Image (cartoon, rainbow, N blue to C red):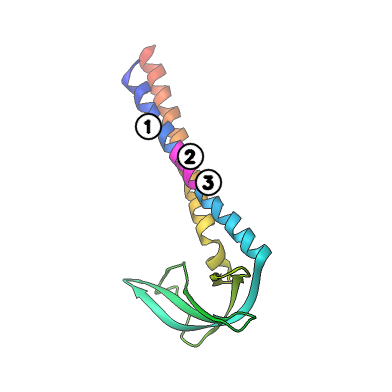
Amino acid sequence: MNAYKNASYVGFVISILGLIIAIYGFSFLLKLEDLDANGIKVKGTVIEIEEKAIYRSPRVKFKTLEGNEYTFISDLDQNKDLFNYTIGQEVEVIYHKNDPQNARINAFWERNFGQIFLGIFGVFLMLFGLFVRWRFLQKAKKYNS
């Protein structure tokens, strides 16, 4: 076996890593489906803006239908140039009926960023790994002949 054929296994490993990342990204979809099926939508208020370097996350306070008050920080850290939340702003919140601490802002990017980013990145890695493997196998074939 020549070195190109051995090196082609790097592409295989990259593809497997991409598959794992894509599956992890799509696992967020299952959590989201559970939240949609068992979620209750209420209004919440942005009470604070958490800042981490160039990123910001809103801290939201909401009341459940039973009247209990909860707060949470958005999982989505946004670049300060794209950040569009202000203190006192009213937002729609969805929380799990059995676990009110499992809550998030009911907006497209807040709900879907994890699975979209990890899914696309994972698929890209899989394709890149397959391409690397294919190219090294071509070189190995050329080297052997």
State the residue position of label 3.
23
Work out which quarter of the rendered image holds the N terminus and state it: top left
Residue type marked 2: Met
For image coordinates 68% across by 63% down, the residue present is: 37
| Secondary element type, mark 3 | helix
Residue type marked 1: Val
Viewer-closest of 62 and 89: 62
Image marks 1 and 3: residues in contact by CB distance under 8 Å: no
Q: Indicate the position of residue 33 as horizontal and vertical percent values.
A: 64, 59
Q: Indicate the position of residue 61 as horizontal and vertical percent values.
A: 51, 81
| Secondary element type, mark 2 | helix
> Which stretch appears magenta?
16-22
Residue type marked 3: Ile
Q: Quadrant of residue 52?
A: bottom left
For image coordinates 53% across by 67% down, the residue present is: 110
Q: Eyeballing the image, is 56 above or below 122?
A: below
Between the C-alphas of marks 1 and 3, the distance is: 20 Å
Q: Residues within 10 Å of mark 3 (few under 14, many from 20)?
A: some
Q: Indicate the position of residue 120 as horizontal and vertical percent values.
A: 51, 50
State the residue position of label 2.
126
Q: Residues within 10 Å of mark 2 (few under 14, many from 20)?
A: many
Work out which quarter of the rendered image holds the C terminus and state it: top left
Q: Eyeballing the image, is 137 above or below 125?
A: above
Viewer-closest of 139 and 30: 30
